[in-house]
Image (cartoon, rainbow, N blue to C red):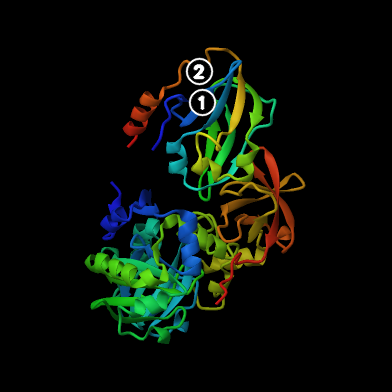
Amino acid sequence: MAKRTALYDEHVKLKGKLVEFGGWDMPVQYSGLADEHDTCRTKVGLFDVSHMGEVRVRGREALAFLNRLVTNNVEKIQDNQAQYTAMCFEEGGCVDDLIIHRIGAEDFLICVNASNTEKDYEWIKNHSPKGVSVENVSPEYTQIAVQGRFAQEILQKLTDTPLSDIKYYWFRQGRVLGKEAFIARTGYTGEDGFEIYVPWHSGPAIWCALLEEGQKHGIKACGLGARDTLRTEMKFPLYGHEIEKELNPLEAGLGWVVKLDKPDFIGKKALMALKEAGLKRSLVGLRSLGKAIPRPGYVLESSGTPVGVVTSGTLSPCLKVGIAIAYVDRSLNAIGTKLDVVVRDQRVPHEIVETPFYKRPY
Amino acid sequence: MEFPSGLLYTKDHEWAQPGADDTVTIGITDHAQEALGEVVYVELPKIGRELKEHETFGVVESIKAVSDLFCPAAGKVIDINSAVTSDPALVNSSAYKDGWLIRLKLANKDALKDMMDAQKYSAFVQSLK
């Protein structure tokens, strides 16, 4: 049976439509996907993201260990700073993508994908040296994302921590509604906002307080459906779509978090070899020039020859056209390139465009 | 949720309304449109196409989902609702009327005899919950 977050009863009260995702019963939508998407873009959206996993890594060697484990340079971040990174297999494919929060040089909180929590925990634990403790602390946290232009104003009502002092990809330990919390200025929507990690059982009270404080700003609960269309408009990768074991971060456009100039890390050799041999594919953004909507798995063609595949595709609620994230042969990755997406028995023209597809106006 | 009594229904959540001269109008049910959410794209067959029973004749898509349309009976497409291809939300707002999808000339007269009436279909939908 699928697991339930501490906010399950709140989703039922809000008439959320529940589906199984990553082993959890999660709301896919409440009022309607398009409305929720629009609310997050123009006002503020509230997301239960408690299905995400959290792994705590502590010990004197924690920093050095993490730096051997992931592709980004963990030494670059300071206390209270967060960092996005990939974590690779020796062969260069992705174990997962993560956000590492540096609480201190010997204490880190890592946020991992829901469906990968067990796998990531095992992977991290199995590679950890003596003296480093690795703990799956996922059951301890309700994670809530408040996203949108009024996020700071609303969350500030529930905390003394001065939120305007927290920059993008930084966090603070503070209190929310009197409960100990990590308050991070991060998100998966392209809007300004926060992801807060609060004690599991205080989830419902904090969720309800945010809904109440946000009422005058038009806050709405948003489901996984909107979360996915929002991240697709930003071309943020999703594990299982843009990244997975058989896909490497360099071709996934995550070269900016792969520091090949830092000392050895898992996957470095394979990634260097890939780069030397020449990358074969690029992850690009496509915009439909027709009416049909590109979907994951649809094939891309250039003059009738298969040249790639769609990894995420949807109707963009903001742009009102079909958009896709897709792998294409590297020789065809230029902005403006016209390619066909095979939609059932038709070839629908698409164009490679600049990403993100959406840029926030504030 | 509404299941008008004059219509016939399938387990794939399509409805059919028999007309004159062995013609039938086909659409998706209130249950189907509600499960799908906001319909943003509809693809229908060309007029004149011969369809077999249970053949896929098009798709309805929401922002996130693609749902195939299955033909309840063999026949030839004699009309399609071009209003829904330009305004797919009609499928949500008027599933049984303005949101109809295609009109068929049936290949044989008793092709609809295995379909459910409103009462049976309503019970079927209940059983899915």
Q: What's the amino acid at mark 1?
A: Ala
Q: Is residue B82 visible?
A: yes
The residue closer to the viewer here, A317 or A99, is A317
Where residue A314 appears, as percent x and y from the top left, is 56, 53
Q: Is residue A318 above or below residue A104?
A: above
Q: Is residue A61 visible?
A: no
Q: Numbered disc 2: what chain?
A: B
Where residue A136 appears, as percent x and y from the top left, is 29, 65
Residue plotted at (36% across, 86% down) = A162
Q: Which residue is mark 1?
A: B16
Q: Is residue A72 above or below residue B104?
A: below
Is A169 left or right of A356, judged from the image as shown? left
Proximity of marks 2 and 1: CB atoms separated by less than 8 Å: yes
Residue plotted at (41% across, 87% down) = A165
Residue B112's tag is 2
- Callout 1: few (<14), some (14-19), or many (20+) C-alpha neighbours within 10 Å? many
**Where's the C terminus of chain A, which quadrant?**
bottom right
- Callout 2: few (<14), some (14-19), or many (20+) C-alpha neighbours within 10 Å? some
Q: Answer with mark 2 or mark 1, whichever residue precedes in sequence.
A: 1
Mark pair 2, 1: CA separation: 8 Å
User: Quarter-wise, where is residue A31 in the image?
Assistant: bottom left
The residue closer to the viewer here, A14 or A93, is A14
Is A40 left or right of A156, judged from the image as shown? right
Where residue A119 appears, as percent x and y from the top left, is 37, 58
Residue plotted at (45% across, 78% down) = A169
